[in-house]
Amino acid sequence: MRENYLTVKGYGESEIVISKSRFLTYIERVETEEDAISFIERIKKMHHNATHNCSAYIIGEHDHIQKANDDGEPSGTAGVPMLEVLKKQGLKDTVVVVTRYFGGIKLGGGGLIRAYGKATTEGLLAAQVVERKLHHLMNITVDYTWLGKVENEIRGSSYTLEEIRYLEGVEIIVSVLKEEEEQFRNWLIEMTNGQANITFENAQFIEFFVR
């Protein structure tokens, strides 16, 4: 299972005009190739009268699904530069469609590559890039006499206190980065003189804005 990776927060769209041509960018987070294809088809249907609907996507933990489509633009001038932007930014599970309405001025190969690359970059700013970090939810069970100290120490730390359950013994649920779990355990054991029972409860991704 992947631990930390970059992707987009969710749906985003933007528009730029270059030499009278309109470039409309649509971006979404997807987990399967089927989802990516469905998104592309939806945008193409929405802009069925556009000159081009170029697309690119990158999916999978090891980026094993990568596709680029020029949709009638000269080979390698649209889909590939769009895909390269996704790869250079280190993104996963992301699909992008750039719709072009031709403005009457030809851009040439180099101009098209720059235009589609810029359109993709602008779209990513609208969609917002996030880093998803795998966290472990840890269950700390202690006697009620330890509650005040443990709660205060956790709230003053870099860890996130998610919940307190008042049962026979108090259970404190804390979110910890996976790679910091051992450090967290040692910290709690030392803090409570070994009186805390620490167990793994669940795993979840928490998102942090990157740009």
Image: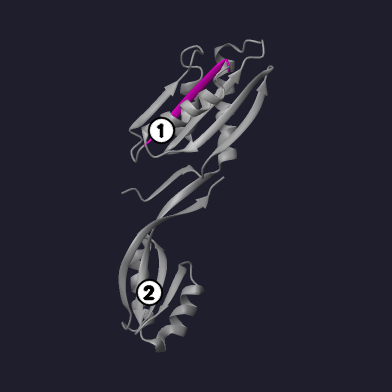
Quarter holding the C terminus is top right
Name, please, the residue furthest toward the bottom.
145
Q: Which residue is mark 2?
A: 187
Q: Which mark is residue 131?
A: none
**Is 95 positioned to the left or the right of 201 in the image?**
right
Gap in Å between the C-alphas at discs 2 and 1? 40 Å
Residue at position x 51%, y 23% in the image: 44
The quarter of the picture where residue 183 lies is: bottom left
Mark 1 surroundings within 10 Å by alpha-carbon count, few (fewer than 14), some (14 through 19), many (20 or more): many
Residue 181 image offset from top left, x and y in percent: 35, 65
Q: Secondary structure at mark 1?
A: strand
Q: Secondary structure at mark 2?
A: helix
**Is 67 positioned to the left or the right of 10 in the image?**
left
Above-or-below relation of 204 to 184: above
Q: Which mark is residue 58?
A: 1
Residue 63 image offset from top left, x and y in percent: 36, 35
Of residue 142 and residue 26, the one placed in the foreground of this image is: 26
Question: Does the stretch in magenta take in 55?
Answer: yes
Q: Which residues are magenta?
A: 50-59
**What amino acid is at disc 1?**
Ile
**What amino acid is at disc 2?**
Trp
